[in-house]
Image (cartoon, rainbow, N blue to C red):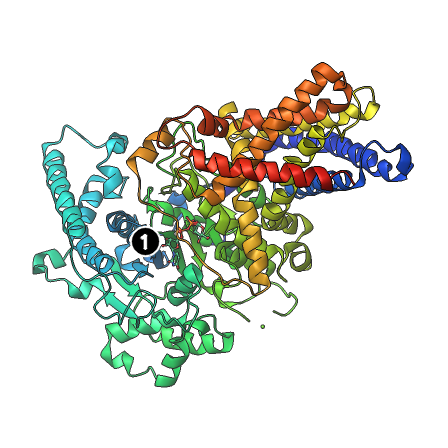
Amino acid sequence: MENSSPLNICNSKSYRFFNMINRSHSLIHFIAVALLVYYRASFLFQEPETRATPLVPWFILFSSELLLCFMWLLGQAARWNPVSRRVLPENLPGDDMLPPIDVFIFTADPEKEPTVDVMNTVLSAMALDYPTDKLHVYLSDDGGAAVTLHGMREAWRFGRSWLPFCRKYGIKTRCPKAYFSDAEAEDNQDWSSQDFLAQRKKIKEEYEKFKDRITTFSGNEWLEASSSSRRDHPPFIEVIEESSNESLEEDQIQMPLLVYVSREKRPSHPHHFKAGACNVLVLCPFSLFSLSIHSFAAQCILTRKSFEIIDTPSTYCVDRSLLETYTDLRISGVMSNSPYILVLDCDMYCNDPTSARQAMCFHLDPKISASLALVQLPQKFHNLSENDIYDSEIRIIFKLAWPALDGLRGPILSGTNFYIKRKSLYGNSIKRVVAERSKVGFMYQSVVEDFLTGFTLHCKGWRSVYLDPSRPQFLGSSTTNLNDLLTQGTRWASGLVEVGISRFCPLLYGTKRMSTLQSMCYAEFALSPLLYCLSLLSLATVPQLCMLNGIPLYPKVANQFFYIFPFIFVSSLSKHLFEVLITGGTVRIMINEQRIWMIKSATSYVYGSLDAVMKKLGMREASFVATNKVEDSEQVKRYEMGIFDFQASPMFLAPMVTILLLNMAAFVVGITRIIFGGNWEDMLVQVLLTFYILVMNYPVIEGMTIRKDKGRIQPAITLLSATFAITMLCLGSVILMY
Ligand SMILES: O=c1ccn([C@@H]2O[C@H](COP(=O)(O)OP(=O)(O)O[C@H]3O[C@H](CO)[C@@H](O)[C@H](O)[C@H]3O)[C@@H](O)[C@H]2O)c(=O)[nH]1
């Protein structure tokens, strides 16, 4: 294929305007930041008697400003050289030349991840537009739930009608739930065809029965083979095809391989959450299990020794030497072991059946395929409202940072929606790098296994590419209430900080193994929860406490350095606005992003960082609270109306409310001082900063004062927070005098 037509095109020209603005802004902003540092540092050279500010608040404030400057500097890398890509699937070789693909879908808890929705993802993957005999779909069920296995059998049964229907009528939306929803009109079917209408009606009825059979299932909670609970059971695998009792005629329908896997779990062995589940499927154990199911004869090759090694959850991350042995076994296997793997979370259904072919436009490109580990596709969500108050879209990652990282050596592995080369997970390096103990597969040292695994792949010289076409290839469900958002944010923060404070810290480990810009990108993500919570918490409390005590922290209006502060503030906000607008957003989105950034910094970033530090000190064990995917109609309604839902844990609400009460008190006192004391020159920046925090967080103030509905902040929380605020005020006023 060396001289054949191109399979993909990489373009950086569309970002010319962005680059021009971004780089000019960086230069100007850098000068302003340098002046700020100069102003703050000059404080040290003043005579102690003439200083208007005590040392402690000055030190805290300067440290916070330095942290923010540092984050800004790191953030430049993730904006430096964005590129966009498109694919030309028409230039792919014929179907007989396409490589096989394994699709791995992960589920963990049928209570939080409704089985019907998981099966919709399974069906959409089975219906991918790819040669059926080259498609193998595996569902990993960490919940070991009987209803999930039942769902798989039902999915297989319904798939026998659904797949031929999709193929015959060229259906694009191959997730039945999405297809039968209101968005169905987008599929451009021939609605005048009687044959189509009759078939569609029939399939819809079958789909309803399929759902009923799952929702009314009343089998055992756990798999019968499971010994006691979801945390203590032997492995259970079923190739769904073999359990079918359908008629001979239906057996002629071409279906991909469909396999249910519930890995072994023992309380005495850490199972490493999703990373452990990934490795069970990706690495040796699964292939061996498959062998044992498919061919009794093949089972004989499994010596007890090898089975013991692979059957121990703690050794899923095995040495390469062992892996090679298993690879031999796999090659002699009878199924699957495909060279490429699509990884999907259970709620991420395939929205574009051609995504596999699109990914192959990179994996089969001889110019890049040798070093290409993965093709990352964006996470997009079907349940976002126009006013996405929780910033669930994560625009900054999928619309800005990933295209920019693609201009370096590729985006960070994002947990789901990626086509990865199996070989890249075997621990091989593309380049000569500092030798690393040969760990393979997904990494266990962080609960954000995706981030760390992607990082180590890039360190080994592998690259990734990012593709974001107009039709989303996958669509998932995002968090639409505050509690779920902050719970998920706490896990992400904990996992990122775990990396940031470990030996994998991108600034130390990365700089020796990848370009400075690339390691800066990784460092920005790994350090952001810790550095943002430290800096934002200080900026939301120290200037306010000082204002209450009449201590100025910023230059007087008459001072020439005064203008630096409003300038940096306006410059940062304008840059943020520019980035939102250029990526198709609105002013409202920018405001939502600012607010959620502040809320997360005061809550999930704090808890996540604490969790990571405690794990590091051996005071806590790793945990993974799976994100809730069950929709509460009342909460969804509030989200769609743009109203915050404060039915969240007091652990999240109390810090937010405490900080706002403190800011409210400081603002009232600050304004009073300006009006009656006439010292507006000294306090202007502090008053403006406090005002900005209050304005941005108006929904929280509204939640604790005006609102009376179920989603408001309960008076008990406000009372508790008021006690915290008064304590902070008393303690802070004493400490900050020094
Ligand atoms: O012990 C576990 C825990 C989770 N999962 C599955 O892992 C996926 C991701 O878990 P979820 O609770 O949905 O986490 P999110 O925070 O929503 O997911 C993001 O963050 C994770 C890292 O924390 C990545 O693995 C995901 O791909 C990424 O979408 C889901 O399909 C789960 O069923 C398991 O298989 N086993």
- Measuring 80% from the left and 34% from the top, which residue is drawn there? 53
Q: Quadrant of residue 476?
A: top left
- State the SS at label 1: helix
* Residue shown at 45% from the left, 47% from the top: 488
Q: Position of residue 651 (x, y in %)?
A: 48, 45
* Frontmost residue, 117 versus 607: 607
Please provide percent x and percent y for residue 486: 47, 43
Determine whether, in the image, residue 469 is placed left or right of residue 123.
right
Estimate how packed mark 1 is, as few (under 14), some (14 to 19) or many (20 or more) residues with alpha carbons within 10 Å.
few
Question: Which percent across, then down, holds residue 187?
Answer: 26, 33
Q: Is residue 578 left or right of residue 23?
A: left
* Closer-to-camera residue (97/561): 561
Q: Which residue is mark 1?
A: 95
Q: Is mark 1 within 8 Å of ligand 1?
A: no
Of residues 274 and 295, the one drawn nearer to the viewer in this rendering: 274
Quick check: 139 above or below 298? Answer: above
Between residue 84 and residue 724, name the one nearer to us.
724
Question: In the image, is residue 301 above or below residue 396?
Answer: below
Figure quadrant of the C terminus: top right
| Res 276 seen here | yes
730 with respect to 417 (left or right): right
- Farthest right residue in view: 47
Residue 360 located left or right of residue 498? left
